Image (cartoon, rainbow, N blue to C red):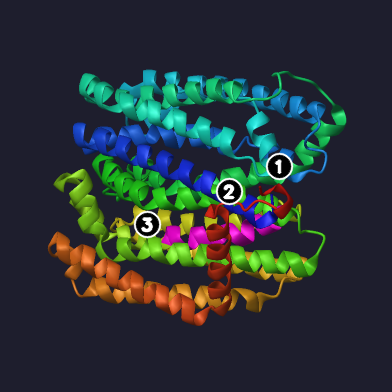
Amino acid sequence: MSGHSKVLRGGLNLGLGQVVSQACSFVKSIIIARLISPENFGIAALFATTYSLLEMISSLAADKLLIQAKDGDLPAFQKTAQLIQVTRGVTNAAVLFLLAGPLSRLFGAPQAQWAFRCMALLPLSRGFMHLDMNRLQREMRFRPAVLVDVGSNVLVTLLALPLALWFRNYSAMLWLLVLQAVSSTVGSHLVAERSYGWAWDRKYAKRIFEFGWPLLINGLLMYGIFEGDRVIIGSVRRLFPTSTYTLTDLGVYSVAFSISMAPTMFVANVGTSLFLPLLSRAKESCVEFERRYLGCLNATSLVAAMIAIPFIFAGGKVVTLVYGSKYAGASAFIGWLAAMWAIRIIRVAPTVATMAQGDTKAPMASNIVRSLALVGMVLAAATGRRLVWISICGFLGELMALEFLIFRLWRVHTLRMQLSFAPCAAFGLCMGLAALGSATGIGDASLIATVFGSLVLMAIGLAAMLLLVPQLRVDIRALLATSMASFEPKRLKPEMQV
């Protein structure tokens, strides 16, 4: 199979899997949000926030090293990584169980202390996951990982309605999270080609820690990026009497945050899994690496613009339509959140490019820059500012982090900065068009006007991207040609014809 065909096949598998998984998460969140109060939804959001803290600050990214390293296919390497993963899972479970009381009081939900203790089941079960499905991605074989992800998401989505009707509070989300973690672990063993086992090889363990220690710091920074705003909203009222935020505000913000983040996670997961092996194979050739990086950046810029435009233009209408009028307050800031996540999508390309070069310090440093936004968020919350200022701070933080990564790729890896100018400028133009469209108020009118206006703005944005980024046109034509060739019936060689 040719390189282009492998990329296309892998991209299709990842894309289809992410579409199903994100659709399931979306449906699950709608069911829970509609059947419980915004305050209970805010408490449910704290579960994921707490779990994410321990996962992000303890990840050595051993699964990524199995893909990136030349000898990552060796059984001893994989078994050492699995032993480290189990140790991490058991440790995180113990910490979460012991801190359940203080955490529940910090967030103003002491009645949910038992639920925070039960959350320890998540890291405990995920610690026993089989890493064979990650190893197989070295060969662009993404189907096992996709099957596990899709299977666990479909299962919990089917159970979301009966559990929500039964509990009618945050307990429904708790047990859905636990069930998803357990089913993912079981699934990873079912799709594995190798037998599961542990081993300790000091050489491999040292390499895992050397590769992963910057990512430990990066994990803490990532937590601040993905969860910091919600932690601030959920806890600041207990730290600063001037704050006016409540658990209801947290629920409304979490809904807007989740619905605007869902497409980002889809693109980020597909992009990271697809771009890492693609760029890693070309890391020895400057010319080929630059060509592949530019293709990745062009693709993420285009996708980011097409995703953000509808949210900026009519995000409030979307939230009200999907989750109900009790979450209408999200219309004040969802556009800023969409722009923030769009820049996050673009950041996938330079982030993965640095990782492909073995530079795990770059993502860490860029997230240090991004985390400066938390200072602004705390000030806004402490002084009683509206929620929109939280999202504006996040947007500015993402913008600074993207600029830093582009600069580092030039400074450390000699990747020309001007490569990034055209796609980023075209993306900025699309954001401006969407903001102007939102200012007209058409996006808050009838559903037909909302859909039509979004489509028109997306078409204009697409035309602008293709006009300003010539290489994007070349990449799209090549992708279409490869796609058409993949679906054409194979012709028999003359000597095989009767």
Q: State which tag comes first along the sequence, 3 or 2.
A: 2
Reply yes or no: does residue 344 show up in magenta: yes
From the top left corner, tell me how far across and down residue 402 is, in percent.
Answer: 56, 65
Q: Is residue 356 left or right of residue 476?
A: right
Inspect the image, locate mark 3, and give the three-letter code of the amino acid beneath it.
Answer: Ile
The residue depicted at 43 percent of the width and 34 percent of the height is 48
The residue singled out by tag 3 in the image is 390
Which residue does the numbered mark 1 point to in the structure image?
138
What amino acid is at disc 1?
Answer: Arg
Helix, strand or loop for disc 2: helix
From the image, give the main secondary structure of the stretch colored magenta. helix
For disc 2, the marked residue is 9
Q: CA distance from mark 3 to mark 1?
A: 39 Å
- How far across and down, in percent of the image, does residue 24 sit? 36, 37
Question: Which region shows up in magenta?
Answer: 340-355
> Residue 382 or 361: which is nearer the viewer?
361
Residue 411 part of the magenta-drawn span: no
